[in-house]
Amino acid sequence: MAEVVLNGVSKTFGATEAVRHVSMTVPDGAFVVLLGPTGAGKTTTLRLIAGLEAPDAGTITIGGEVVNGTSPAERNVAMVFQQYSLYPHLTVRENLEFPLKSPILRTPKAEIDRRISEVAKVLRIDHKLDNKSTQLSGGEMQRVSIGRALVREPAIFLMDEPLSSLDAKLRSELRVELKRIQAQLGATVLYVTHDQIEAMTMATHVGVLDEGGLVQFGTPREIYENPVSTYVASRLGLPRINLLPVSVFPGAPADAAIIGLRPEQIEQGAGREAKVTRVEHLGDQMRVHLDLEGQAITTLADPHQNYATGDTLKIQPRDPLYFDATGQRI
Amino acid sequence: MSSFSVTEPSKGQKWFAGIVVVVYALVTLMPLVWIIATGFKSPADAIAYPPKIVYEPTLEGYVNLFTTRTRMTPEALEEIGPPQTWYDRIVRRYDMVISGPSRYGERFLNSIIIGFGSTFLSIFLGTLAAYAFSRYRVPLKDDLMFFILSTRMMPPIAVAIPIFLMFRQLGLSDTHLGMILLYTAVNLSLSVWLLKGFIDEIPIEYEEAALIDGYTRFQAFYKVVLPQATTGIASTAIFCLIFSWNEYAFAVLLTSGTAQTAPPFIPTIIGVGKDWPAVAAGTTLFLVPVMVFTILLRKHLLRGITFGAVRK
Ligand SMILES: Nc1ncnc2c1ncn2[C@@H]1O[C@H](COP(=O)(O)OP(=O)(O)OP(=O)(O)O)[C@@H](O)[C@H]1O
Ligand SMILES: [Mg+2]
């Protein structure tokens, strides 16, 4: 396991700046989650670290060594592809063996069998080991693809939305398993996801990408509580942060243009009157959609509360986040 | 009305398709059956009119194909004594004795060496070139691909004279190596184009995964690309073999002895005796290697290509 450092890394495809001057340190043993909307450059970042793309500028360091110009094999990274590419001419078992049998590792047979049965059990694919890899469901393929990474002991695991096509139950089980394995091995992981819960529960650090640039890097808590911009603030939190004109509530600093209110930053029972437009019962919580001067606001309420559409509700901000007109945090 | 299925043909459609296939098979197989049958006829039966459907089969054609024979006077035959083997007995009917093997065996072997040699070389070079064209940024790629294809735009025999002179200068005339190189040169354009198409179809993600799994570019090619290209390689190999196996014009022009292949040799069997059964026998045997090769590779042709493991 090793520390991975990106220093001023850029990659352009034609006119698209896929990754723009990214500097980031993935500490040894850290679980770093990359967040960002589609096209933000998450996959490209992983591919640059893996050595599948060469950066136009900047250096990439793995375990203290600059790896620019070395082949993927020499970098000793494991990657779970977004388009999980299992070798179609091989069985599940042969797919899992493939990295262990590489000329670099040349793992002894007994060791191969031990690791494969271990990983297969964790990923619940032990009953499919002798299937052709083309005769699997999407979720099974994805798990074999994760398994092909987990059988190794690489410098870093690169995982591109590895749990995206699993059902909710399996996803939450594997989330726990992956985190357990990572902690147990002390593995360094760089992990791409769009899933809020994965980001918050697994990450030791979160990096937020915007159009190829790294806009904030910190612990999940920092990112959640102290976002540098409205963009970062919108990446985490469910329901999403409410972004309103400052004029809606009094007490904003002079240069603020936008007030950011996470649902839990809205206090009920005092302040301005808002109209309830919709109520969603989610079992453990209740989402209340409000209308205040034509602004839609979403907040949470005690599920025992009896709100109905058309009711009015007094709300006021508590410790809100303020942003300037360009969306930067004040 | 019975239910309609997209994949299941109706009864009528099945019958119609069946009849078409049978008729087509009859038409195309007729000459083949004729040749095979003629190989087992006596020379008299072979030229009988109307043609004999029922006849007494004999191996005379095959014996004549593989031997040279001399006619002898009854006295001389008396001296030799009765025939010793079944093939002696066949030729003795015409007052002849076997004086030695014919050239057919050698020519057949030449065909095997040259046909399979050039097929192997065409596939070997073709696969490497096709991979490079498919995966690497080759300067002037499109122009090169067009140039390679353009070598097939005229009949190869159009350049027969320059090739003839070139071969004489280089000492390649009537050599196995010369014929292998020539057929490889002709087949390469086909094999590069066909194989490039097949390799283009294999997503590059597999090689990327293999690179990350600790393999070099060449190992990834060998372990991941080649196994998935077997369908393409098998069908291309069959095309290449069929061309070099059947090629006649260059073989007549450039070979006469050592490296002569079977196609220019078979017509010479006719000789003065109008020995059609021997010609038919030679032709029948000549078909066997290509048939065996095709049948051996059939499982690769039919297996189909599976690209199911990549989420697109
Ligand atoms: N090989 C390529 N050629 C050209 N453009 C590319 C290539 N790879 C990526 N891009 C572009 O680079 C940008 C970043 O792509 P990338 O795949 O890194 O996004 P992503 O953050 O992984 O998105 P997603 O969440 O949809 O997977 C996109 O605009 C994409 O179109
Ligand atoms: Mg991606």
Image (tube, rainbow, N blue to C red):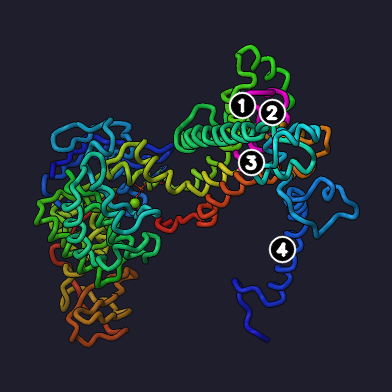
Residue extending furthest toward the right:
B49
Left or right: A45 in relation to A269: right
Left or right: B190 in relation to B223: right
Classify residue A268 by image quadrant.
bottom left
Mark 2 belongs to chain: B
Question: Three-letter amino acid code at disc 1?
Answer: Met
Task: Tell me the residue that label 3 is attached to.
Answer: B242
Task: Tell me the residue that label 1 is attached to.
Answer: B179
- Camera-side residue of A271 and A11: A11
Classify residue A222 by image quadrant.
bottom left
Within 10 Å of disc 3 (Cα), the crowding (few <14, some 14-19, many 20+) is some
Which image quadrant: the N terminus of chain B? bottom right
Tell me whether the residue at label 2 lies in contact with that at label 1, contact meaning CB atoms closer than 8 angstroms: yes
Left or right: B196 in relation to A161: right
Distance CA(mark 4)–CA(mark 3) = 23 Å
Q: Position of residue B260 (x, y in %)?
A: 66, 27
Mark 1 belongs to chain: B
Earlier-in-chain disc, 1 versus 4: 4
Q: Is residue B151 above or below residue B240?
A: above
Distance CA(mark 2)–CA(mark 3) = 14 Å
Residue B175 lies in the magenta stretch: no
Specify the segment rendered in magenta.
B239-261
Which of pointers 1 and 4 indicates the residue nearer the eye?
A: 1
Earlier-in-chain disc, 2 versus 1: 1
Classify residue B109 by image quadrant.
top right
Which of pointers 2 and 4 indicates the residue nearer the eye?
A: 2
Q: Position of residue A158 (x, y in %)?
A: 24, 49
Q: Residue at x 26, y 43 (%)?
A: A102
Task: Tell me the residue that label 4 is attached to.
Answer: B21
Task: Tell me the residue that label 2 is attached to.
Answer: B251
Q: Residue at x 71, y 44 (%)?
A: B89
Within 10 Å of disc 2 (Cα), the crowding (few <14, some 14-19, many 20+) is many
